[in-house]
Image: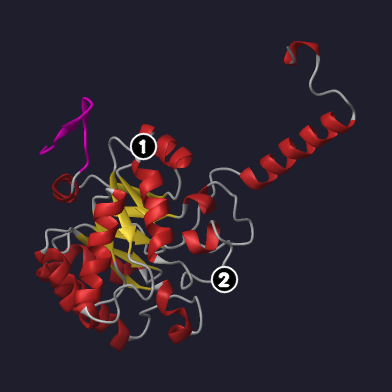
Amino acid sequence: MSTYQYKNISRVTTHVLQEMKERGEKISMLTAYDYSMAKILDEAKIDVLLVGDSASNVMAGHMTTLPITLDQMIYHAASVMRAVYRALVVVDLPFGSYQGNSKEALNSAIRIMKESGAHAIKLEGGTEILESVKRILSAGVPVMGHLGLTPQSIYKFGTFEVRAKEEAEAQKLIEDAHALAEAGCFAIVLEKIPAALAARVAEEVKIPIIGIGAGSGVDGQVLVLHDLLGITKEFSPRFLRRYMNLYDDMLDAVSRYIEDVKLKDFPNEKEQY
Ligand code: KIV
């Protein structure tokens, strides 16, 4: 395995991900937006951490990913980077920071790399953004693609339903995936598309394909951390597996603390000086 060491830990690089695909080892990826969570995920040996623009939803409480700014993404990414020794850290280019032209896209990517120390960027779209992808890659910045249900286009789609069920959209997605891979992207996220289509893309395209709601025939899986932990109770798509009900557990813990304070039970003799 081609690795490089940092504090005696072998880091996950884009090359390591490619080798994982080639030997059939699945890639694990989760979102992270802050130091404390990123530290736990890195210690658990997650392969890839995504500082996703889903921070706009789960951290800032917006309805969509559109409002989050480049400065805010850099703040989240820099916090994550302070915690990480092993994982590859990928940062979303937020809506409005790359769609204008390829120079704007490159400048946004460079700001993320310089100001956060992250390892790669992700952006949504296929052939429409290919010029930007190539320009960012030519500056030496690794790029991850994102196709299917691309949340920055939610007002164009008008719904969070499964994408590419129709032949024309499926065909365009396949062409986009090939174009991104040929341009030099190191991986592609496929979001909420039919499992058979995702498996076909993973078979045809030589770079790692990471799915979210895209079935098991891809090279890896990504979830939003807050969904996996059960913090976002209201969000229950079929593809989500919850490993905890942290919302309820936290509600219980905080309620018990409030009760202890009110009952003058906290702090007790041993909890004071
Ligand atoms: O922002 C995000 O969390 C993402 C994942 C859903 C892939 O892009």
The amino acid at mark 1 is Asp
- 148 lies above or below 222: below
The answer to whether 15 is drawn above or below residue 64 in the figure is above
The amino acid type, in three-letter code, at marker 2 is Met
- Image quadrant in which you'd find residue 164: bottom left
Number of numbered discs present? 2
Who's the residue at 25% across and 75% down the image? 104
Camera-side residue of 74 and 237: 74
Q: Tell me where residue 126 appears, x and y as whole percent.
A: 24, 77
Res 64 seen here: yes
Q: Residue at x 42, y 49 (%)?
A: 32
Q: Residue furthest bottom?
A: 168
> Of helix, strand and loop, which mostly describes the magenta segment?
loop
Residue 119 image position (x, y, % from top left): 23, 50
> SS class of the residue under badge 2?
loop
Residue 190 inside the magenta-drawn segment = no
Residues drawn in magenta: 1-12
Q: What numbered label is drawn on residue 215?
A: none
Q: Earlier in the sequence, mark 1 or mark 2?
A: 1
Q: Residue at x 21, y 57 (%)?
A: 208
The answer to whether residue 3 is magenta is: yes
Judge by depth and name the residue closer to the eye, 105 or 227: 105
Residue to which mark 1 is pinned: 42
Disc 1/disc 2 C-alpha distance (Å): 28 Å
Q: Position of residue 183 (x, y in %)?
A: 11, 70
Disc 2 target residue: 63
Residue 245 seen:
no
Is residue 129 positioned above or below 26 on the image? below
Q: Nearer the viewer, residue 223 or 95?
A: 95
Instruction: Find numbered disc 1 in the image and state the secondary structure of the residue it sits on.
Output: helix
Quarter of the figure that contains the C terminus: top right
